[in-house]
């Protein structure tokens, strides 16, 4: 019998061409009076997207204020600014227009408004959020899956600390997904997004070896099939988008995969997955401000080689079913071929497979600092496939160097 689970995905999804023109009606359904439009850089303005959104709000008689400036690895200082602006303007709904960074920043603002006190407490695990100002989103980058997830990750400038907070109260009321809005993304951003999407499912796919010794079953076949299908789909279309950035079908496949990869469906019936690679990348991204998906790609193969013997059967299955590797003389050899195939895929979409390829020359002192911060953030150890302590994490950073 599979592990018991509760699946909760309350976000209404509106998918397709021109979907952003429905935003006014969707906000009105929430019985809200004034909206904060939260966004990143100038592309949302230059493309006319913000104009289409404000026109839709105005048609429904909904007031709004705006706050731009969200950057990758969204900053706590802007979250504080957003909280104060919303209090001053009487905002009762937050509309995120952008990718995962904008949505995560919006969730943090929503936490701060609905709970009071210092919002960083929730990311520092000093308090648990009890509520969140309602949020909707217009997705422009397929990557983080934050449009349907319960997670938010924020970077505190002081100390360069990147931390996440997971709570169902922050789940978006609606998500508008128009694949056309992702067509102008730079190739590196598209590839980094694809790496992030796959990793959200890979983290859930690699589960704890110990379940086999306590009369618990393996993962559900249907969950594995969904996960493997999603990963293969993203692999296929990530390569297509390298040469055909305006391919609507590939953009649509990747955008929907982004949502499915992080809304919980690929983890139903499992132990929740590993997540050590994510935790290690949080420290890398916090210290060096690298793109999240690229940072994950830079670390993953080193993590995999460090832990694969704990779940060699699982890594062999991944190699054959996802990476298309022919079974070798034993599971060990098959697993290692799968890891190599993943590295080849990353290189095929111009993603790094080492920290050096990220353009970072990391020192031993920085490795030790990141490892120590990672274990503190994880509460004592990282990972499920293999419990990783400070020196383990440092070793993986060294392997990835």
Image: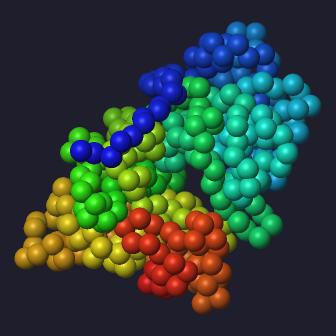
> Image quarter for residue 372?
bottom right
Q: Does the rendering let one see residue 170?
A: yes
The image shows residue 138, relative to residue 307, as above or below, that is above
Query: On the rendered structure, is 220 left or right of 297?
Result: left
Residue 248 horizontal/vertical position (percent): 38, 34
Query: Going 50% across and 43% down the picture, which residue do you hit?
Result: 145
The image shows residue 234, relative to residue 210, as above or below, that is above
Q: Farthest residue toward the left?
A: 329
- The residue nearer to you, when weighing 213 against 317, is 213
Query: Going 23% across and 41% down the picture, which residue do you hit?
Result: 222
Q: Farthest residue toward the right?
A: 88
Query: On the rendered structure, is 106 left or right of 298?
Result: right
Q: Does the rendering let one see residue 322?
A: no
Query: Going 74% across and 17% down the picture, which residue do you hit?
Result: 32
> Image quarter for residue 55?
top right
The image shows residue 299, relative to residue 218, as above or below, that is below
Q: Farthest residue toward the bottom?
A: 364
- The residue nearer to you, when weighing 133 against 140, is 133
Residue 216 horizontal/vertical position (percent): 26, 54
Residue 280 horizontal/vertical position (percent): 54, 69
Residue 26 horizontal/vertical position (percent): 60, 17
User: Can you say which quadrant of the picture contains the N terminus?
Assistant: top left
């Amino acid at each position: 019998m599979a592990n018991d689970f509760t699946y909760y995905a309350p976000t209404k999804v509106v998918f397709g061409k021109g979907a952003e023109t429905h935003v006014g009606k969707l906000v009105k359904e929430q019985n809200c009076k004034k909206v904060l439009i939260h966004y990143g850089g100038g592309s949302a303005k230059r493309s006319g997207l913000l104009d289409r959104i404000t026109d839709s709000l105005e048609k429904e008689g909904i007031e709004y204020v705006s706050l731009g400036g969200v950057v990758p690895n969204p900053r706590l200082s802007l979250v504080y600014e957003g909280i104060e602006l919303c209090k001053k303007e009487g905002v009762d709904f937050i509309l995120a227009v952008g990718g995962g960074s904008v949505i995560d920043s919006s969730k943090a603002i929503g936490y701060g408004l609905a709970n009071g006190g210092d919002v960083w407490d929730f990311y520092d695990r000093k308090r648990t959020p009890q509520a969140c100002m309602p949020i909707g989103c217009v997705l422009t980058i397929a990557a983080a899956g934050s449009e349907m997830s319960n997670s938010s990750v924020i970077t505190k400038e002081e100390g360069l600390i990147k931390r996440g907070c997971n709570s169902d109260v922050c789940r978006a009321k609606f998500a508008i997904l128009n694949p056309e809005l992702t067509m102008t993304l730079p190739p590196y951003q598209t590839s980094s997004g694809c790496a992030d999407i796959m990793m959200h499912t890979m983290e859930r796919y690699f589960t704890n070896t110990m379940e086999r010794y306590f009369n618990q079953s393996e993962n559900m076949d249907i969950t594995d099939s969904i996960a493997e299908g999603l990963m293969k789909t993203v692999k296929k279309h990530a390569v297509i988008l390298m040469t055909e950035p305006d391919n609507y079908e590939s953009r649509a496949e990747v955008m929907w995969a982004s949502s499915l990869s992080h809304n919980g469906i690929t983890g139903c019936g499992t132990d929740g997955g590993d997540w050590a690679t994510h935790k290690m990348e949080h420290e890398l991204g916090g210290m060096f401000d690298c793109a999240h998906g690229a940072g994950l790609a830079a670390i993953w193969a080193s993590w995999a080689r460090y832990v694969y013997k704990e779940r060699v059967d699982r890594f062999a299955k991944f190699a054959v079913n996802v990476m298309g590797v022919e079974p070798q003389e034993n599971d060990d050899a098959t697993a290692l071929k799968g890891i190599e195939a993943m590295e080849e895929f990353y290189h095929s979409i111009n993603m790094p497979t080492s920290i050096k390829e990220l353009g970072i020359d990391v020192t031993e002192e920085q490795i030790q600092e990141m490892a120590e911060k990672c274990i503190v953030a994880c509460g004592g150890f990282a990972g499920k496939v293999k419990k990783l302590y400070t020196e383990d994490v440092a070793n993986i950073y060294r392997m990835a160097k």
